[in-house]
Amino acid sequence: MTIVPELVLEQVVNGLLVGSFYIILSLGLSLIFSLGGVVNLAHGAFYAVGAYLAFEVEKRLGFFGAMAFSPIFVALCGIVVERLFLSRLYNKDPALGLLFTFGLAMAAEQALRMIWGTTGLPFSIPDALRGQLHAGDFIYSYYRLTILLVTAVAVTTCWLLLNRTSFGMIVRAGVRDPEMVRAMGISLRPALTAVFALGVGLAGLAGVMSAPLAGVQPAMGNEILTATFVVVVIGGLGSFWGVVLAGLLVGVVRGLTVYFYPPAAEASMYLLMVLVLLFRPRGLMGEKFERFE
Amino acid sequence: MKKDAKTLNIAGRRDAIKRTAALSAAAAAAPLGFPGIVRAQSDAIRIGHLTPRTGFLGQVGEYGFRGATLAVEELNASGGVLGRKVELIAEDSVNPATAVTKAQKLIERDKVVVLIGEVSSASAGAIAEQALKYKIPYFNTGANSDALRGQNCNRYMFHVEGCNTMYTKTIGTWQKDHNLIKGAKWYFLTADYAFGHDLYRVSSRFLQDNGGIVLANDMVPTNTADYSAYILKVRALKPDFVYLNLAGVDQTTFLKQYKEYALPFPLAGGVMDTVPFWAAGLDNLSGHWQSLWYHGLKLPAAQGFTKRFWDKFDGPPDNQAWGDYVGVKIVVQSFAETKSTDAAALITHLEKGASFDILKERQGSFRTWDHQLLQEMYVVVVKDKAHSKDKWDIFDIVRPVPGPKESLEAIQPTQAENPCKMT
């Protein structure tokens, strides 16, 4: 096939847009794992809950109301889950935390099915964000540019939170050396709860943003979960910028695969992960494994 | 010494990732489902219902299950058949491997006399093999692939659902009438599995036989969440038509994202399931489509079914609910007419051309050589939002195809096009 440079560039730029969406989700997952050591298999469930809540809130407060309130509500759910269940599992076998979040994910999906039914719920792009931007030969939908903006704001806010606040300092110290933090008399409990709430709140935000594009249906959490894990693994566990880079990379690789060989489009991110794990097992920007000892 | 949350198990984190992989593999293994039993009785006639209730076809399958359930309830309310009640044993057949194990379970353990249902062409093919092996009739109510009626046909499988050729020729008739095919360049987006490949083969052949040009075809994995990359390709190619060979949730996702980019190229498709279109919402729909059956059909029998379904399930039936409902009714009526549940008698009865009320203008009967239910389909057009009464009221019916005076064979594949050798 003839390779048209402008079209390839178009796919790359679009890939960056698509990839930015993965970042919100993966950042939350990475944060929860870094501090709490919990592999949150229910991350997709919180994402789905975010979308369903957005569907409900949107009816009363419009899309922007949904964007504001749905993640907050999901974060509140996260606080409840963390306080009641996860906090008891931190110092136990890590498999228990994993099993719990796995069970939570299944229960959540069935609950969504029971409450809202099995069929997809219609959810459209709000009128204010409809339309396309034409930049030369390229076309961008306003809505996806909005997602990019939201992602940028979320990433910046998280970074500031982690690097410019005392709370962030405690979190970073807790990731590095929780024993020392405890020895200095600082309790990590509130930090753990806050980070979990923040992480799932981000997932809920991603759910709201994706509802007009991918629809609202009970299996949505399950489907997005594997992609989220892949991005976190490629980026490197525990690395902030690694996740950002990995998200963008996955988006671009997918877009290019669609251009050259569409049947492999969904598989492309897994191939990428295999390559990264083979040649750089810690991920693109992950810390060396010794640090975990 | 009390251990509290401040003491974190650091070394276990690495193990956690390893365990994730193992657990995820376990989770991915076939989930065990519990069968739904509608009225358990020992002397009842057992009908096995297989359909995906989860996965990307899950929402369509759910409607099929509802249609089958309603049919069984109505039959039992009017006394059952041959002096016995009817019992529906339903299983979730989320993928072909699961479909096989569930089919075997229904036949060997639950002793069903007939299998009915399925939406995925891949799963239907797998079920058909079991039907042949165990000599249990299987009524396909949702799988469209021509191959099931052709190279993979078998004596024990009957098709209530329309085949890809029927769908293609229905919308194709309308397109030909409006001069949209000759010289037109089409871009195809095809679901990368059995059904999609089959539909692409049929629809591209139809296009080319009528003077159109295949501009490009992209195979898309099922469950793709983002179509922006494909839509950008479409924009660069500038086709006269974008022809969708997608199924289930993928239809919904694509329709919404296509609307997002507001490209000027009209959409058409080789299949239309009402449920994914409802999920997309009227705002995201446009154009002419084909439908096997639609609840807006103004016939007393159809309206009666619509009302009873609506009363029971708080919403109208879609084409899949219709298919499973009619399928159950055909099976039970055939038992009554042959005065037995014997498979051979059933097959002979249907092959002789027994006709049934299928809630359409014309009665339906099965074609002898490929067991396809001969029936009309409908060209529908997306309704103007101002005239839509509720979120399900998305289409106006334009016309039935074939027309009232035309042979029902007009939209069927010929023996040359889709040869079938029954074993």
Image: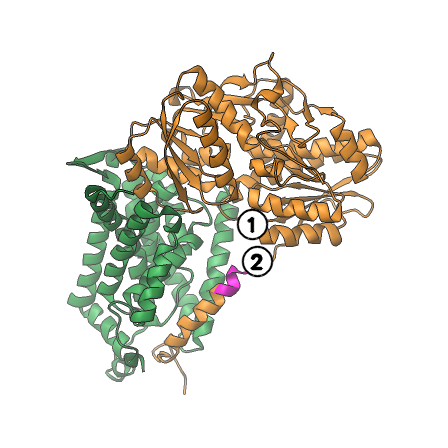
Chain colours: A green, B orange
Marked residue chain, label 1: B
Q: Earlier in the sequence, mark 1 or mark 2?
A: 2
Tell which residue pokes out farthest to the top in this image.
B405
Measured as percent of width and height from the top left, residue B150 is found at: 61, 36
Residues shaded magenta: B25-31
Marked residue chain, label 2: B
Q: Residue at x 26, y 83 (%)?
A: A180
- Per the image, the residue denoted by label 1 is B94
Measured as percent of width and height from the top left, residue A171 is found at: 25, 71
Q: Are marks 1 and 2 in contact (CB under 8 Å)?
A: yes
Seen from the viewer's position, the closer of residues A182 and B310 is B310
Q: Residue at x 69, y 23 (%)?
A: B357
Question: Is the N terminus of chain A in the top left, top right, bottom left or bottom right quadrant?
Answer: top left
- Per the image, the residue denoted by label 2 is B30
Measured as percent of width and height from the top left, residue B104 is found at: 69, 53
Q: Is residue A87 left or right of residue A8?
A: right
Residue A209: in sight, yes or no? Answer: no
Residue type at tag 1: Val
Residue B275: in sight, yes or no? Answer: yes
Residue type at tag 2: Ala
Q: Is residue A160 left or right of residue B30?
A: left
Above or below, B381 relative to A166:
above
How far is the residue under mark 1 from the one under mark 2?
9 Å
| Figure quadrant of residue B361 | top right
Mark 1, secondary structure of its residue: loop
Above or below, A160 relative to B240:
below
